[in-house]
Image: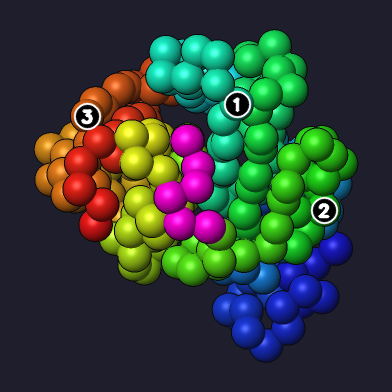
Amino acid sequence: MYLVVAFGRRMPRLLRFLPLRADMITRLNSKEAYDLLYAQDDMLDQYLSPGRLSFYEEVANHCSEVLVTTYPVSTVRVVDLGCGTGHLLFYLWKCLGRSPHVEFWGVDHAPAAIERGKELMPQAKLIIGDIYNTNLYSNYFDLVLCTETLEHLQFPERAVKEMDRICRPCGKTVITVPDGAKDKWAGHVNFWTESDLWEFLKPFGVREILPLDNEMVFGAVLSKDREVI
């Protein structure tokens, strides 16, 4: 398949006739591009590389510690904004021993991603939605996840405000972004150093920033144990 099939005149002239590759598609940074990526088996196999899946497992391990420490016996609700194929939720479900006491939700703007996610995590509630306006309940989720998404957004603060809105008082939000001092990828529009990220997330109750993925990624833990914005 060639790019002209999916995008026609909206694509740069040179790219219209090149064979499809996952890195080329994601660099376009659009809903249409990601929908195409998730719909094509060969490109999705490229995208879900062993390194990416290992990263999801690493994040899931950290998130399971947050949940077990904060809610050792309670039934909890978890949502992943920008959930893609649902692999992060899947690994978190496994880390938690496939517990029936965790309610999993996911939101993504690409319909093909949600279809993939439903195959992987049929027990989760996965919906097509807008990260700036999810239409989810306010103060509802014990853990809000958003991994490798904010660096793609034109209005990242709006997205974090939405995460804060749906996170319940005393709940946690976990956000990951690439280390902006090392990240040179052309598909990203935001590049945060560790100090930049602290400053950006300070109004939202950032408590910790951890190095992940061999120190290529920052993992920020936010706590809503403050007055609701």
Disc 3: which residue = 207
Assign a secondary structure to mark 3. Answer: strand
**Separation of marks 3 and 1 at Cα, in angstroms:** 24 Å
Residue under the image location 45 percent in, 66 percent down: 132
Of labels 3 and 2, earlier in sequence is 2
**Separation of marks 2 and 1 at Cα, in angstroms:** 26 Å
Q: Is residue 27 left or right of residue 201?
A: right
Residue 107, picture quadrant: bottom right
Is there a contact, CB below 8 Å, between mark 2 and mark 1?
no
Could you tell me the amino acid type at mark 1? Thr
Residue under the image location 74 percent in, 40 percent down: 124
Q: Is residue 22 left or right of residue 216?
A: right
Q: How many badges with numbers are in the image? A: 3
Could you tell me the amino acid type at mark 3? Arg
Write down the region rendered in magenta: 137-142
| Whether residue 197 is situated above or below residue 2 in the rendered picture | above
Asked if the magenta segment contains residue 117, the reply would be no
Disc 2: which residue = 115
